[in-house]
Image (cartoon, grey):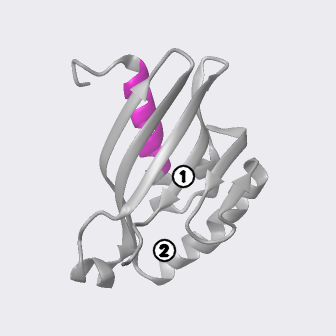
Amino acid sequence: MDMNMTQDEAAIRRLIEDWASAVRAQKVDKIVDRHANDIVMFDVPPPVEVRGIAAYRETWPPFLEWLREGDGTFEIMKLEVAAGDRVAYATALLRCASKAALAKDNTPRLRLTVGLRKIDGAWNIAHEHHSFPADV
């Protein structure tokens, strides 16, 4: 652990890295693990606003199908965490594209912002915001 990183920041980093690993392994139960029941997600594809753990779970099968069919990549390239006693947030840049698209442009483009709450002493993801920069 980085000497400047708190235990909470390290725990959150592990939680987010485990989430990304679950996405790559296409394990929906692990993807939704450690998410608050009242999670709110703002996503790239419709529906752009998702509320509640059941609706969040339903967003994953189409993405995982795309990941399989498109020989996709989902890698955290940069992750920063800030934690208080009961709430925290993290920002990340990811590579999320097909291998063919990454061969043309390997720049991390998926932006991720995560809001977390401590529930019963453990960090849980309460908000996710996924976005890509606008093509101008």
The vertical placement of 80 against 122, above or below, is below
Name the amino acid, label 2.
Leu
Q: Quadrant of residue 126?
A: top right
Q: Nearer the viewer, residue 131 or 29?
A: 131
> Is 120 colored magenta in this rendering?
no
Residue 65 horizontal/vertical position (percent):
57, 76
Q: Secondary structure at mark 1?
A: strand
Determine the main secondary structure of the stretch shown in magenta.
helix
Residue at 50% from the left image edge and 28% from the top image edge: 88
The vertical placement of 107 against 50, above or below, is below
Residue 36 horizontal/vertical position (percent):
68, 37
Residue at 63% from the left image edge and 74% from the top image edge: 62
Q: Nearer the viewer, residue 88 or 20?
A: 88
The vertical placement of 2 against 128, above or below, is above
Query: What are the residue bounds of the magenta stretch?
Result: 8-19
> Is 11 colored magenta in this rendering?
yes
Q: Which residue is mark 2?
A: 67
Residue 46 horizontal/vertical position (percent):
66, 71
Residue 84 horizontal/vertical position (percent):
47, 18
Pointer 2 or 1: first along the chain: 2
Q: Quadrant of the C terminus?
A: bottom left
Marks 2 and 1, how far apart in space? 19 Å
Q: Which residue is mark 1?
A: 129
Name the amino acid, label 1.
His
Q: Quadrant of residue 116?
A: top right
Task: Residue lying at the far front in this picture: please name it.
Answer: 136
> Circle 1: is it few (<14), some (14-19), or many (20+) Cα within 10 Å?
some
Q: Quadrant of the N terminus?
A: top left
Q: Secondary structure at mark 2?
A: helix
Residue at 38% from the left image edge and 18% from the top image edge: 7
Residue at 32% from the left image edge and 82% from the top image edge: 101
